[in-house]
Image (spheres, rainbow, N blue to C red):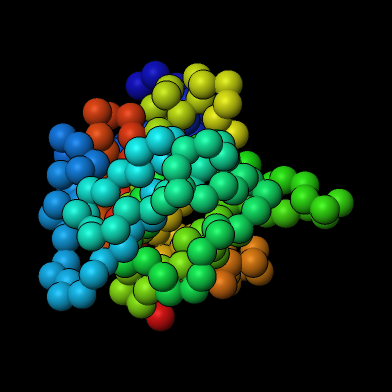
Amino acid sequence: MAHIPSVAISLIAESSNLRKRYPPIKSTELLAIRHIPKITYKSRTLDLGCGSNPRNPFGADEAWGVDIRDDLGSEIKVANLATEGIPFENDFFDFCTAYDVIEHIPRNSWANGQCRMAFIELMNEIYRVLKPGGLFLHSTPAFPSKRAFQDPTHVNIITEDTMPDYFCYPHRWAGLFGYGFNGNFELVEQRWVEDSWLSGILRAIK
């Protein structure tokens, strides 16, 4: 029997981290359609990093946006989400979406001379502006896809376990370990799109 070096054994054991446990789906929009709730009042959605056209995959009655640019329209408010909060009031939205945004939010940033855990704070802000039971949908290039790393503006790499373990019941490690997360989500569903983007829906528990 050939001798297998301990390093090789360790790499084989760790290879499970590279496997994708969540099944694929054709698009993030199809994932949203699977979970559109029945709402009898006028619903609102917020699209983060929206550019000139806020996305509305849940078919809300009103679509708002947040972007770093200040020339995009009255329904789009200006904010740098790496250093600022979301400029809307508490419990305002039924839905929030982030397409190709999370990977651009640094784990840490500096604001007013102080270190800010920007990614944690963004998740706090998303939780804050969502109504009880509101849905957060993200689509993010994730590990182990090379798309997570190849863009030089990507500063935040997530895995399949980032959202379920750190921001969702029952683990919620970003709160339990004292990282500053004050919210609480439930993972509704998580899928891979085109083998590169991790798309997930989280429900705000309030």
111 or 162, which is in the foreground?
111
Q: Residue furthest bottom?
A: 206
Q: Residue placed at 36% from the left, 77% from the top?
A: 132
In the picture, residue 73 is in which quadrant?
A: top left
Q: Residue placed at 77% from the left, 47% from the top?
A: 110
124 or 179, which is in the foreground?
124
Instruction: Estimate the x, y position of residue 70 in percent, counting from the top left.
Output: 57, 39
The answer to whether residue 27 is above or below residue 169 is: above
The answer to whether residue 107 is above or below residue 173 is: above
Instruction: Estimate the x, y position of residue 179 in percent, counting from the top left.
Output: 65, 63
Quarter of the picture holding the N terminus: top left
Instruction: Estimate the x, y position of residue 63 in percent, counting from the top left.
Output: 32, 53
Q: Is residue 77 left or right of residue 82?
A: left
Q: Is residue 152 left or right of residue 3?
A: right
Q: Is residue 151 visible?
A: yes
Q: Residue placed at 31% from the left, 74% from the top?
A: 133
Instruction: Estimate the x, y position of residue 75 in percent, counting from the top left.
Output: 42, 51
Quarter of the picture holding the C terminus: bottom left
Q: Residue furthest right?
A: 113
Q: Total label count?
A: 0
46 or 108, which is in the foreground?
46
Q: Residue furthest front?
A: 74
